[in-house]
Image: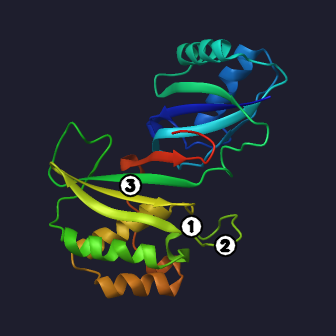
Amino acid sequence: MRYFIHLAYNGSAFFGWQIQPEHPSVQETLETCLSLLLREDRVAVTGCGRTDTGVHASDFYAHFDTEKHISSDECQQLAHKLNNFLPKEIVIFDLFEVQPDQHARFDAESRTYQYHVCTRKNPFKLQFSYHFHRELDVDKMNEAAALLLQNEDFTSFSKVHTQVNNFICHVTEAHWDRVDDELIFTVSANRFLRNMVRALVGTLLEVGTGKISVEGFQDIINQKDRCAARTSAPAHALFLTKVRYPRIKN
């Protein structure tokens, strides 16, 4: 039997989603609690993505398999027990049975990330927002962000040594919005490369300061070279905010 878990987590306490040797991860923490509650040696959990160290997820899905049949009521009881066992940084919203062929990672149609940039010093946003003190031209940043929808090879914004067959992503949304004293970058795509969003943000901020022109941003994409892009923005201000599936109403 296969079950989906809908959850969220504060990534500050973890070395990313994926299990890491000698470091705490969300995946390992969840597997440990599930194995204990289901009384199985090891319940393997597959996530919808692999967030990096310090990155958060306000909308995340994972699946696990078990020989046991868990009724709808028992699913809710299990979700409640998980919330009692898991650390405060992880919350379970729902747990439900799916078809055996449904896959948390490969069935996801799109993912949406948001990056928060605080434009003035605010001690109450230090944990989840990147304080950027220089003036930014948001119109130029949006002009450059719009180019993401016209391109598909994002080698320049991916970690070099990564196990992927290609660097093709289909971006369907990319824009900056001002909300009070924050600038929020929203980007959606069918898939993302490792470090891609943070590399995009770091480079778009350079467009905002005038160090890179809009044309220069396109040149960086064309070069297909990670060295052409700028330094990645810090991880603590990045959130996975939406994962869409064709067979799940979410």
Could you tell me residue 67's position as x and y percent? 85, 23
Classify mark 1: helix, strand or loop: loop
Name which residue lies at 69% across and 22% down: 34
* Residue 150, quarter of the rendered image: bottom left
Q: Are marks 2 and 3 in contact (CB under 8 Å)?
A: no
Q: Are marks 2 and 1 in contact (CB under 8 Å)?
A: no
Could you tell me residue 171's position as x and y percent? 48, 67
Label 2 is placed on what type of residue? Asn
* Residue 134, quarter of the rendered image: bottom left
> Reading the chain from its start, which is encountered first: label 3 or label 1?
1
Question: Which residue is denoted by mark 1 in the rendering?
Answer: 159
* Disc 2/disc 3 C-alpha distance (Å): 25 Å
Question: Which residue is denoted by mark 2 in the rendering?
Answer: 166
Task: Say left or right for 117 vs 56.
Answer: left
Label 1 is placed on what type of residue? Lys
Q: Nearer the viewer, residue 33 or 184?
A: 184
Name which residue lies at 47% across and 46% down: 242
Task: Say left or right for 127 vs 76.
Answer: left
Q: Nearer the viewer, residue 156 or 218?
A: 218
Q: Which quadrant, please, contains the N terminus?
A: top right
* Disc 2/disc 1 C-alpha distance (Å): 12 Å
Question: Which residue is denoted by mark 3 in the rendering?
Answer: 234
> Reading the chain from its start, which is encountered first: label 2 or label 3?
2
